Image (cartoon, grey):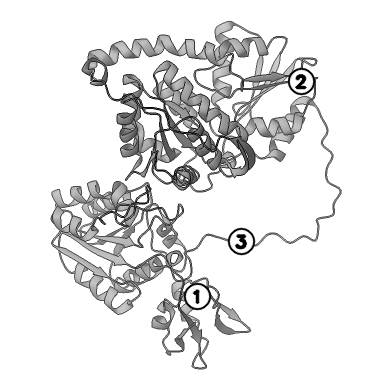
Amino acid sequence: MKKEYVMGNQAIALGAMAAGVNLACGYPGTPSSEIVDTIAKRNKDKAIHVEWSINEKAAMEVAAGASYAGARCLVTMKMMGLNVASDALMSLAYVGVEGGLVVVSADDPGPISSQTEQDTRLFAKYCRIPVFDPASVEDAYEMIQDAFEYSEKYKTPVLFRPTTRIDHAYGSITYDENAKPKEVPGFVKNSKRFVIFPRLSRMNHEMIEKRNPAIGDDFSDYKFNTVQGKAVNKKAVLAGGAGYAYAKEYIQDREDVVLIRVATPHPLPEKFLIKALEGVDEVLVVEELFPYLEEELLQLIGKKQLKIKVLGKHTGNSPLAGENTAECVACEIAKFLGDTIEESKADTSDVPAPPMRPPVLCAGCPHRASFYAVKQAMKDRKANFSGDIGCYTLGNAMPLDMVDTCLCMGAGITMAQGLHWTDEETVNFAFVGDSTFFASGMTGIANAIYNEADMILCVLDNSTTAMTGHQPHPGTGMNMMGDVVNKISIEKILLGMGIEKVLTVNPLDLDEAKKAINECADAKGVKAIIFKSPCVALFKPTEKCVVTDKCIGCKKCIREIGCPAISVDDKKVVIDTSMCTGCSLCAQVCPMGAIEKEVR
């Protein structure tokens, strides 16, 4: 056994390995990405099959197939990815599994790096499958192993819902560093079970509805559903996930209030809750995102005709949106219990407000050059710019201002088509990254070709999945097993799909890039430009740019491209050479030729 201080996502990965996982797959998305990365790095003998699938739906289906053969499977994604995987997951919930199959769907309260504040607990209820809600790194390590056991016990996929503060927290765990994958018995054909038809679905639906109360009863004895304290003042605090951690931090070991933890929100452990609420007249529910526990508790109280008042989001005692903090939860509980929180006596009157630090594209990022080239080429024409999910979403920031829409992965391509059909005189651009192209871009492209849309597809190919941690994808020539594989050519795919004009340019050559853009803008139909230049984090720069005495202080380089390496010091433009990669976009923008490249 080995003790190690690890990140929450690493603990989940090690817990899955301790459970004997045979296959781990998923699609990178913050805050879940490090789980698959960790398994891949520690999979020294390649006994576990590890892959970044092209999207979450593909990952779910790969895992379903392996589970049918009896393998234990882990599927990872952020909560937005669960939408993509839901087609497969919903049917899988009806069909069931053989080997344990656990789906980690990492929620992002805030949100910190997501489009929405989606709540996976609701998805569990929607799919009628169990969900585990860890409250700490240590919990996550143990509970992921329990999730596999419950999955196999009840032949059902299981959701596992860590949030950002669990995924990226740190804690000490003790694990078996010699854990091995379980033996896989192999696939036994049974079309009456594994081929889903309406009659089978109805039968299985009835089975699920009868089974779930039994799982709820089982969860009533689960070790992580806990209760402490006594109803001295007839008050209780009920919490789950990170909310429980914050509630526990405030209440500590007080015996005058009941603290109830629900670690398995669905199916609800009703017997546990009814017993825990004995002698309680009033409950404060502490949770993030949707008032899930609050509504489940209200339903249970109504069903059992209990006289208990429930406070939470619906009553204004907790915020309806955003993530919890230890401070806000402490204030909520103190107000509920009638406690007085002593304010800090520290004098902070002269402490300045923290500076604004909006996210920006990195210095030297090729996406900046791509956006700028399109902006310059289209400056005298009416154009729409449909963006997508990735680093390049940051192209919306000033001074580039080159992302007019951003909805979900792959949507920029199809939204550009919708915009075209409402105004055929406007030039419509769709920006998509190389990883997103494989994940969800090709169906939209096929739609554009088939329906004869007029648009320009801009593939921002930086040879990685940059925003989530530089994971490989089908175009990089490397997979998560460490194998060198054939690169799938984006250019050949586009040509094979029927796009006649496909141009590949280096976005850091501004004139070449603008020429390609104008050529496509003057043509009809679907056209494509592949802006190909590697992410600056993939290489060590050998050059840098410097400002010479020719500079007249016009600041065009700052106004036009917004590179964070360029600033003004004592009314003079300066370049921070520690940040500069030598991309030379600023040199091409400068009207005086005052910026030159030098060897580092």
Q: Which quarter of the image is occupied by the N terminus?
A: top right
Q: Which of marks 1 and 3 is nearer the N terminus?
A: 3
Q: Are marks 3 and 2 in contact (CB under 8 Å)?
A: no
Q: Which of marks 3 and 2 is nearer the N terminus?
A: 2
Q: Position of residue 96 (x, y in %)?
A: 34, 20
Q: Position of residue 345 (x, y in %)?
A: 86, 48
- Element marked by disc 1: loop
Report, in whole angstroms, how far the alpha carbon at label 1 lies from the one at label 3: 22 Å
Callout 3 amino acid: Met
Callout 1 amino acid: Cys
> Dividing the picture into quarters, in which one does residue 73 lie?
top left
Asked if one can make out residue 319 in the rendered structure from this viewpoint, the answer is: no
Q: Is residue 253 left or right of residue 314?
A: right
Q: Name the residue under label 3.
A: 356
Task: Give the residue displayed 51% in from the left and 30% down from the top.
Answer: 144
Task: Give the residue displayed 66% in from the left and 16% down from the top.
Answer: 309
Q: Position of residue 404 (x, y in %)?
A: 37, 57
Q: Earlier in the sequence, mark 2 or mark 1?
A: 2
Q: Name the residue under label 2.
A: 257
